[in-house]
Image (tube, rainbow, N blue to C red):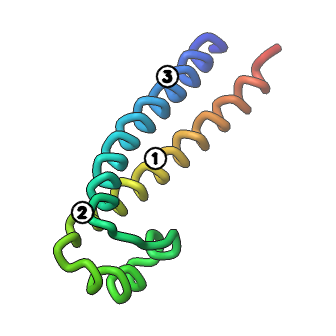
Amino acid sequence: MYILLISIVIGLFAAMLFINIYFRVKVLKTYKTLVQNRVEFGAAHLFNKAKMEQEIMPKYPGMQNEIQEFVRHLRYSIRMASVLLFLITVFGAILMYFRD
């Protein structure tokens, strides 16, 4: 049982690492496009869709797809990392309980 739990924690850690690298590459590609076109917005716009559509989208009409893609990838990356971090913590706690 202990070996299985350690294997699960290691597998989840590897999954978190892979997802982080994969989405970091996707986010950086989109970010590079946004920087080249001088698109600027703050962190408040990332998590507030209405604010993004009211304040940023009208300023950059040609970059709407790239902005939406950037925000979507960033949110998904954060969500997946949070879930995997939670699972690693839960399985780590279980490992501590069954250590003896």
Task: Report, in whole angstroms, how far the alpha carbon at label 3 lies from the one at label 1.
Answer: 15 Å
Task: Report, in whole angstroms, how far the alpha carbon at label 1 lies from the one at label 2.
Answer: 21 Å
Q: Which mark is residue 96?
A: none
The local secondary structure at tag 1 comes to helix
The residue lying at 32 percent from left, 83 percent from top is: 53
Residue matched to label 1: 80
The local secondary structure at tag 2 comes to helix
Give the quadrant of the N terminus: top right
**Label 2 sits on what residue type?**
Glu
Residue matched to label 3: 11
**Label 1 sits on what residue type?**
Met
The residue lying at 26 percent from left, 65 percent from top is: 37
Number of marks in the rendered image? 3
Estimate how packed mark 2 is, as few (under 14), some (14 to 19) or many (20 or more) residues with alpha carbons within 10 Å.
some
Q: Are marks 3 and 2 in contact (CB under 8 Å)?
A: no
Q: Nearer the viewer, mark 1 or mark 2?
A: 2
Q: Is residue 3 left or right of residue 71?
A: right
Q: Earlier in the sequence, mark 3 or mark 2?
A: 3
Residue matched to label 2: 66
Q: Are marks 1 and 2 in contact (CB under 8 Å)?
A: no
**Label 3 sits on what residue type?**
Gly
Q: Residue 64 at what x, y percent from top left?
A: 22, 72
Task: Report, in whole angstroms, how far the alpha carbon at label 3 lies from the one at label 2.
Answer: 33 Å
The local secondary structure at tag 3 comes to helix
